[in-house]
Amino acid sequence: MLFTSLDFFIFLPLALLVFAIAPVAQRWAVLLLASYVFYGYLRPFNLVYLGAVTLVIWGCGWGLGRATQKPMRVALFVLGLIAVLGSLTAFKFYDFIAGEIEHANLFANLKLPRLGITAPAGYSFYVFSAASYLIDIYVGRLSGKQNLGQVALFTAYFPKIFAGPIERATHFLPQLLSGLHADPVRFALGLQLIGWGLFKKVVIADNLAPLVDHSFKIVAFAPPLELLISTYFFAFQIYCDFSGYTDIALGISSLFGLTLMENFRRPYLSRSTAEFWAERWHISLGSWFRDYLYIPLGGSRAGTLRRAINVMVVFLVSGLWHAGLGYGVGWTFLVWGALNGAYQWAGLATRGLWRRVGEALPRVAASAWLRVLRIVITFHLILLSWVFFRAGSMHDALLVLQKIGARLTDLPHLLTIYPFSAEQLTGFGLIAFLLVYEIVDERRPVFQRLAAAPVALRWGAYYLGIFALLLFGRWQAKEFIYMQF
């Protein structure tokens, strides 16, 4: 079931109605039932995967909470992690690696068996949440004595199951124990978030998607300027698609009295790639890698060289995590991760230099023009990496960059003669609207501005948004991109 489908617009009010009439102590059970209905609606067999992961982490967590001998604790912990993370790795990469080994022809006439299994939608997301649950119990942040049903809800909670945020049990489970109460203010905020998320998805992302898909399917034949436009469009398509899902997930949770982690914070206004990844883009995944991989590897405590290695390991693993059904499993994701890791290396290497420049020229360092320049440079560094993320192969990615690079000096002339389509002009207009919105939102949240605005202006904005959804929205139940990773 998709957030943009008619089925969901029937399902959500029914779930809210049952939730509202249920006793407070049993409302988590209503959400658990709703989550299993939601996840198994189109593919009931997916519930087998979800149930298996839930039983593994609950069983191992239960054992960790009661085991006193270190060998037993280590055994349960390792067993649980291998089961959940090992299954994710096998589903994603075994068939690809087997094919690469055969293609390399290291062993004559070698034929390896294939699993023929792909991970169900959302598997990467709820497996990472499940792994964090086990790790938190092992290190003592959780007791391991949680109710099986509530652990099942933590794993299966329907707003986040397909594309996050990657929630932590330490944040989610206490909310269940304190009882779930929806209040009018949070309910109104939830509706606003749902509306804005739908706008980003069906109006912006899904209007850009056909243009991007067309160009990246015919890389060898597409004109360089069309490839450049589609690269820009993809940057905003993936942002609006993914952050739109997050907004809807957070909004739905507010309707039920739950709070999920923030996942996006206007990422294309970042002044450095470090700020982009650490503070603004897919925050729940970045914090997951920081807490469960980067810090255990030694973080920044083990010297400059070790820190650089740790940073690159995190981004390479992130690249592997992103490989999936959406744009295939290939080397492009490793290159994408390595390129972003290299950006962090450059930032670390020049941090001292920029600090000294700021101390010597404080007025320049604080100027708005320099801030804008840094934002533009950061955006284009991220844009370059998106080419590898979106392209279907390394050959296509390099061809896109080669064709664009060869005609960069001709861009002013090409822009004057290029026959822009109505769809492309609409795409530019939607991106311009989004940028204005986010610049305004950066200074003070738009929802706060609306709350303080006159009633006529506030409701005028709401009705205008609904009109835009109906008039410009593409409601063909197109999947969210990150559901497939």
Image (cartoon, helix red, strand yellow):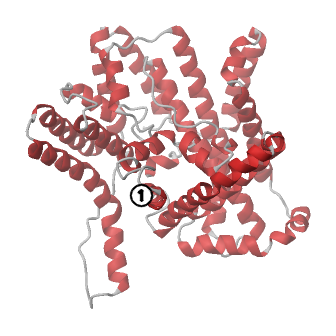
Whether residue 458 is situated above or below residue 478 in the rendered picture? above
Q: Which quadrant would residue 306 be assigned to in this image?
A: bottom left
Q: Which quadrant would residue 136 be assigned to in this image?
A: top left
Residue at point 91% right, 67% down?
A: 413
**Residue 418, x across and y down, in percent:** 85, 64
Relative to 126, is 137 on the left or the right? left
Residue at point 69% right, 54% down?
A: 353
* Residue sitting nearer the eye, 347 or 76: 347
Q: Which quadrant would residue 403 be assigned to in this image?
A: bottom right
**Residue 387, x across and y down, in percent:** 61, 63
- For mark 1, give the secondary structure: helix
Relative to 461, is 258 on the left or the right? left
* Residue sitting nearer the eye, 204 or 262: 262
**Residue 471, x across and y down, in percent:** 71, 34
The answer to whether one can see residue 427 in this image is no
**Residue 243, x across and y down, in percent:** 57, 39
User: What amino acid does circle 1 point to?
Assistant: Val
* Residue sitting nearer the eye, 210 or 310: 310
Disc 1 target residue: 317
Disc 1 packing (10 Å; few <14; some 14–19; many ≥20): some
Residue at point 57% right, 56% down?
A: 344
Whether residue 33 is situated above or below residue 95 in the rendered picture? above
